[in-house]
Amino acid sequence: MVRIAICAPGKRLKRDRADMVEALVAGRDDVSLHFHEQCFAEDGHFAGDDGVRLRALVDCANDLAFDAVWFAMGGYGSNRIAAQAIAQMNAAARAKSYLGYSDTGFLLGALYRNGIGRVAHGPLAGDIRREGGERAVERALDWLKGHVSGLEPGLDERPAVAFNLTTLAMLVGTDLAPDLGGHVVLIEEVAEHLYAVDRMLFHVTQHLKGIAGLRLGRISDVPENDRPFGTDEVAIVEDWCARSGIPYLGRADIGHDAANKIVPFGLEARGPRA
Amino acid sequence: MVRIAICAPGKRLKRDRADMVEALVAGRDDVSLHFHEQCFAEDGHFAGDDGVRLRALVDCANDLAFDAVWFAMGGYGSNRIAAQAIAQMNAAARAKSYLGYSDTGFLLGALYRNGIGRVAHGPLAGDIRREGGERAVERALDWLKGHVSGLEPGLDERPAVAFNLTTLAMLVGTDLAPDLGGHVVLIEEVAEHLYAVDRMLFHVTQHLKGIAGLRLGRISDVPENDRPFGTDEVAIVEDWCARSGIPYLGRADIGHDAANKIVPFGLEARGPRA
């Protein structure tokens, strides 16, 4: 039985999505879920103000009654509480698994930088509402239970991390950013113009000299622009990799979708949980 | 007579805008304008491919027949050619004035970092099409002639720079970025959600520790979101300044509009041209 606490460091979770996830695991003895009430709070853009979100995250992380913290939603806002959360985390927090993606990449990065827990990029609880969302949720639960069947298939012997590109672009060079030297870095993006993807790859490749290479996940829902960019996302990544001396290592099976595979941060998080 | 070369390091200029600017100065003996043919080129997103835009920029900068290089348009793309352009610039380029904003901030930053020319953030030639665009163009020409009547009114004895916030967020920490220690940094933005503004201010304030302070220009055309952010742009900047220890120094008279005032980079560019 893996005991999973769920909180929302950025955007709120709709209650019907929580209900769908709870229905999926009802009566099972392999997982127990605790949706923190903060998941459903609302304060402007956020699932509660910074204080509310911070307390919920720290409550979940520091509670011995849970084995894992699973993020409910992305959105925006985890960067606003990440440094304070890290500073308050205790020994129980260090023994947990953490899973999410999109905006929660700020937290994944900060946890990994500080050597706290087993950290992975993968489905959020809120992904249940996607087409194929049940498979995404089962994949997430599987990794939280310590299994490896949902891992991104191209992971090799080198440590890896994965990020939403916008999140990574805003993370690099900050106090939350881990040292990614020697790592394979997987990126994905949604709903950004290709010129913005190009601009972020300029920024990110400048900051990530020394990584083992870049792998490109799905760049989905690109908005129509008033003129075509002229190349596609593969050419964009190949171009910036060539300019910066970073090896381009091909496509990756991650994205803002239900097929989003699990990318544990570093090598230790690929094994079973302690 | 100040002799001004105009090129487009990112987006193309429509010919009718060039015609409007030329009509404004026709018969005058205080300025002469040369629109490089590259301004009107088109290649996907850009005013010609990287090679075409690079050659035009270097041609304009290195030509003894011109006193200044004025950027035609922003858009996106100057970061793709900035490093190569800087590397090719000669003594004539070092004696020139350079003026633009928005995406051309990548070039302004790189020129300032490398001590090349008098650099300022201010109207583009393409701003002629805005309501009040003739005044914007006259303000630009005035600074290019060596006058100071169009300077941003809050500049003080400290060196300053100004940037579009997105451009600055993608510039910080890269090989193009100048050391802004001790500088007052003015920022403006257009057509970005407030959550994205907040996210960029997280990133930028993390990178700009040691600056003298931040001043906030106009944040215009904010798109409607599915939920309100909860605070406004002043509260956002005050918040990140407080978190990072950067003094917030109030509003600034810059923006993506015809009222956009001139912000010379550093102190020397505020005086008359050599």
Image (cartoon, coloured by chain):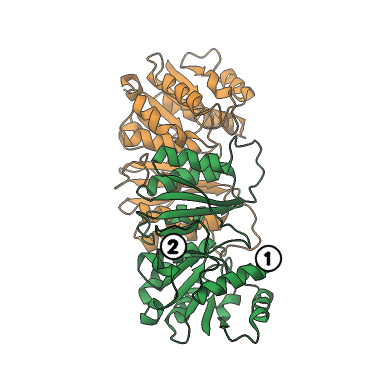
Chain colours: A green, B orange
Q: Is residue A253 left or right of residue B61?
A: right
> Which residue is at the front of the view, A210 or A9?
A210
Dot 2: what SS?
Answer: helix
- The structure residue drawn at horizontal position 43% and vertical position 38%, both measured from the top left corner, is A242
* Image height of A74 relative to A170, above or below: below
- Whether tag 2 and tag 1 are in contact, CB under 8 A, the answer is no
Distance from Cα at disc 2 to Cα at disc 1:
40 Å
Q: Pinpoint residue B261: horizontal percent, then vertical percent.
A: 47, 37
Figure check: B81 above or below A152: above
Label 2 amino acid?
Asp
Instruction: Please give the name of the residue rendered at 45% of the width and 66% of the height, measured from the top-left corner.
Output: A107
The tag on residue A99 is none
**Quick one: B126 or A116, which is closer to the camera?**
A116
Q: Dot 1, how many residues are within 10 Å of its Cα: few (below 14), some (14-19), or many (20+)?
A: few
The answer to whether residue B32 is above or below residue B225 is above
Q: What residue is disc 1 on?
A: A132
Q: Are marks 2 and 1 on the same chain?
A: no
Callout in the foreground (2, 1): 1
Viewer-proximal residue among A37 and A254: A254
Whether residue A166 sits left or right of residue A160 in the image: it is right
Q: Residue B141 at what x, y percent from top left?
A: 47, 25
Q: Chain of mark 2?
A: B
User: For the point 32% across and 50% down, which residue is it?
Assistant: B211
Q: How many numbered marks have been drawn onto this rendered protein structure?
A: 2
Chain identity of mark 1:
A
Which SS class for mark 1?
loop
Residue of label 2: B239
Q: Residue at x 64, y 58 (%)?
A: B225
Identified by mark 1, the residue type is Gly
Q: Quadrant of the N terminus of chain B?
A: top left
